[in-house]
Amino acid sequence: MAAENSKQFWKRSAKLPGSIQPVYGAQHPPLDPRLTKNFIKERSKVNTVPLKNKKASSFHEFARNTSDAWDIGDDEEEDFSSPSFQTLNSKVALATAAQVLENHSKLRVKPERSQSTTSDVPANYKVIKSSSDAQLSRNSNELRKCSWPGVPREVRPITWRLLSGYLPANTERRKLTLQRKREEYFGFIEQYYDSRNEEHHQDTYRQIHIDIPRTNPLIPLFQQPLVQEIFERILFIWAIRHPASGYVQGINDLVTPFFVVFLSEYVEEDVENFDVTNLSQDMLRSIEADSFWCMSKLLDGIQDNYTFAQPGIQKKVKALEELVSRIDEQVHNHFRRYEVEYLQFAFRWMNNLLMRELPLRCTIRLWDTYQSEPEGFSHFHLYVCAAFLIKWRKEILDEEDFQGLLMLLQNLPTIHWGNEEIGLLLAEAYRLKYMFADAPNHYRR
């Protein structure tokens, strides 16, 4: 009876775990009751086929040049219950995974955080830093391959600008492009920022102003007034230039990785504790403008996550449910037994790209790969979420009530994670992508 009452409390509470409670310092976006209701109503049952766990993990196909847009037709084309999804021959999967990992392990480096020199950087990244890298345009796919396993700290800023499409590959155009785009951003500030006090923009600005202090409150960098002013400008300008979505809680988190990476270009010590008042005005303006444009590039590919009723998130959560039902039938049925809906925990995973579940250092490492993988922030993120969920299968199966499951899923113990854990997670995500998305014809019942 106590367990039943506990379940009823959680179901009736407007503040579901994860909707308000801070994890790594950010406020969770509230769930739209209409969205939750519709999701539960439309939830369809799928026939599940258990798959044996495989130790193989791999990644390939960096040559595809596609945009970061979420393909609206993906769910219709990838019918997980279709007979076309057949069992992959384990020997083929293991051999393929081993070969690809062996090839790409050669590209890994372990850079020092300080006193790094160009000689410490792999040849691919030396090309980025040199002034004679016209061949980079032809080698953009090689750059993605090299960046997939993680980018050295000292070249991460320029690599992210290139991978996001903000910085042109042609060396001769870079200086002028950066100058023009930075001036364009501050032109937006001059033109639009004063309108934050106008009545029709007050709600947007007020919400941004409320959310920013809640962004990573445990990291001193983000509690500095000057940094918070920069974030306010970035978010407000983005919101009024994208009226289809406007500002939505969670977008504030997406600025932080870019800001930290571009700040690291000027700071050798621990960025999270650095006092930005020690930087010149020109440096701060460059960091602000570059953070705005790269965040904008990211959001261009997932904007349907933030339009009215957030249909992109609803679609992706449904896809996650179907995928998990194929990967691990036991976990999926465990959720059904205790009436746990995927939207109750995975909304945040999609809305904030797992930033509330991982330390910031892990998010930055994760984004090295997301920017290297075609449709990384949209399509590949689905497989990362699936791998992340199954990582905790033992803990999930040990919980035998509704409240315990939600508390676990909203407070997963990742605070001590680092590059090794993220590397394993990404390798498993790629294995799932390879099996379910890239090679559907290899399956048989």
Image (spheres, grey):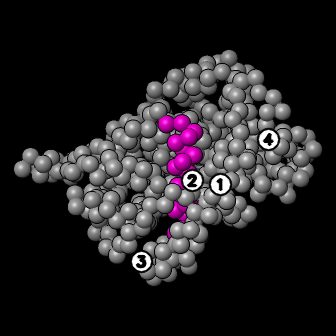
Q: Residue 206, position in %: x, y?
A: 45, 37
| SS at mark 3 in the image | loop
- Apparent side of residue 419 relative to residue 178 in the rendered image (left or right): left
Residues at marks 2 and 3, CA–CA distance in whole angstroms: 25 Å
Mark 4, secondary structure of its residue = loop
Q: CA distance from mark 2 to mark 1?
A: 9 Å
- Disc nearest the viewer among 2 and 1: 1
Instruction: Residue under label 1, please give it.
Output: 101
The three-letter code of the residue at mark 4 reads Pro
Residue pushed farthest bottom?
Answer: 83
Looking at the picture, does residue 186 appear above or below residue 431? Answer: above
Give the quarter of the figure containing the C terminus. Answer: bottom left
Residue on which disc 3 sits: 81
**Dot in front, 4 or 1:** 1
Mark 1 or 3, nearer chain start: 3
Circle 1: residue type: Leu
Q: Which residues are magenta?
A: 417-438
Reading the image, the residue beneath label 4 is 122
What type is the residue that disc 3 sits on? Ser
Nearest to the observer: residue 189 or residue 46 = 46
First in sequence: mark 2 vs mark 1: 1
Q: Are marks 4 and 3 in contact (CB under 8 Å)?
A: no
What residue is shown with label 2? 427
**Which residue: 42% across, 65% down?**
52
Q: Earlier in the sequence, mark 4 or mark 2?
A: 4
